[in-house]
Image (spheres, grey):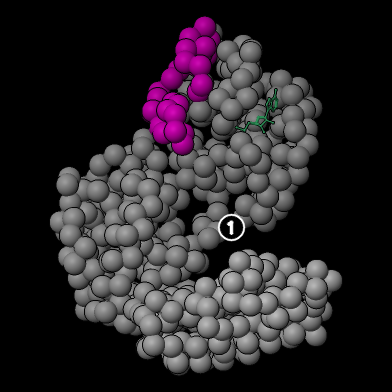
Amino acid sequence: MGAVVGEEVPLFDGGGEEYRAGRVALVRAVGVVFSESGRASQREAVVDWLRGLLGDPNERIRRYAMAALPKVGEREVVERALAGMARGVSGERERRHAGKALAKVAGRGALEVADVLPAGVAQKIKAGAAREAGGRVLMDVAMPAGVRIHLRGRRGLEGFVRSEVEGSRMLRGRMRVVGGGSGLVVLEAAGGFSLGDVFSLRCFGTLNLVLGEVAQDWEAVAGVIASERVWRMVRALTEGVPRYRLEFIGEGHRRGAVAAIAERVHALRPEMLNDARSAMWAVDLHPAGGRLSVELRPRLVPDPRFSYRLADVSAASHPPLAAAMALLAGRGESVWDPFCGSGVELVERARLGGVRRVYGSDLSREALRAAESNLDAAGVKGVLRCCDFREFPRIAGICDGGVDQIITNPPLGRRVPIPDLKEMIGDLFTLAAEVLRPGGVLVLANPVGSEWRGNPRLRRDVSQRVDFGGFDCRIERYSVRHSRRA
Ligand SMILES: C[S@@+](CC[C@H](N)C(=O)[O-])C[C@H]1O[C@@H](n2cnc3c(N)ncnc32)[C@H](O)[C@@H]1O
């Protein structure tokens, strides 16, 4: 063991009861030191020492040794020692401590004793083993008719989601919009669809399968999650052992309630495991007029729809919002994003098809590197330049009616105040009127309001207030009038 430990441990071992009780922190310190450093032979010695402490007459020393053991490695030896401890001790409290430590190593040995442990800990151990074995949500399984889906997302994007559903060839005749609310579009399936089909839509934030609506009663919530109907659905949609994370939406951590519901679900349906870490499912509890809407959500990280986003910038657009802006632009053969950042709007527009020329400009080299790699990953070819947006049309040769569409999320002056924001957006309108073809469109997030009014070539035809993640902004569409002297 290390130098300090080499001196302290013999003193600890040879000390009297009181001396040892006063230096119990040494046990934790040894665990921490050897979790980060130490040769294999030293770790073995540490594990031996800690195992010896599992038989100490002092309960605190035993407890500290149990907590330190999983940190040090030597997984199989540690697991055997802790499993023996869990089986051997008589007190419930000590068994729980042994179980908690075991949950951190969670191999086959831990699973063998899981059933003698308190329910919450047993579930943790099973979840740990299942996590290690892997698993995922199956996106191509056919789902039955009657399933309800809540597509949730940013407030203000509901209309885009609805028109995506209604215009989707993939979902035609299989899914219809039956309701909605703020940031919510409710769908009902006529059958024969898969989760992957719904993920062909790009403007929603999360896909939630509605399991039921119940009173704020934990027994009722657990009853829904563990029901036969839900189990059949979860089973069919999961490869591996289904694990879920439980969350009260908009209410912060409610650890007591989460633990109570998870334990009850486990008692009713032991095959379904609560797991706060990297579970493939979330069960979200959304407030619904004094009741709770219980919703099952695949946790897909990264979101497969936006997997081209290999690189990011801090001011990057929320991808479903960029998708909505692309949708708003409609048809066109060429598109320019003057403030392209990591290129999300450009990729989203290119994915809709019909685009032959893609242009992007940004002042930041880092942003352009991100845009390059994202466009590349999405298979989109573009002309990208590091320059002020006012310079770009000349550089790219698109000065006079050279593009069909401008789609952009400019700096909004929120995180970094921009003194000449109004002037900058004014310049954008002036430039748009010059570079856009007659009939072309400018789609932007507009942080300043009415700067376009001085420009007779532009006509505003859409203005939609959208939640930009804590503040509202308008996304707007302007069309270029056909006559230059309008
Ligand atoms: C809101 S971000 C754009 C985010 C982008 N849509 C994305 O998803 O990554 C605004 C971008 O404008 C760029 N910018 C600021 N002033 C500029 C200017 N005068 N000319 C060109 N780009 C500028 C910033 O470097 C920043 O990357």
The region drawn magenta spans 446-474
Magenta stretch: residue 11 in it? no
Amino acid at pointer 1: Ser
Q: Is residue 161 left or right of residue 24?
A: left
Q: What residue is at 80 percent from the left and 73 percent from the top?
A: 7
Could you tell me residue 392's position as x and y percent?
A: 74, 26
Q: Is residue 154 left or right of residue 57?
A: left
Could you tell me residue 83's position as x and y percent?
A: 50, 89
Could you tell me residue 247's position as x and y percent?
A: 36, 57
Which residue position is annotated with label 1? 307
Q: Which of 269 and 324 lies nearest the eye of the viewer?
A: 269
185 lies above or below 38: above
Q: Quadrant of residue 79?
A: bottom right
Could you tell me residue 109's position as x and y percent?
A: 52, 91
Magenta stretch: residue 473 in it? yes
Q: Quadrant of residue 81?
A: bottom right
Q: Which of 141 and 417 lies nearest the eye of the viewer?
A: 417
Q: What residue is at 44 percent from the left and 58 percent from the top?
A: 200
Q: Is residue 427 left or right of residue 465?
A: right
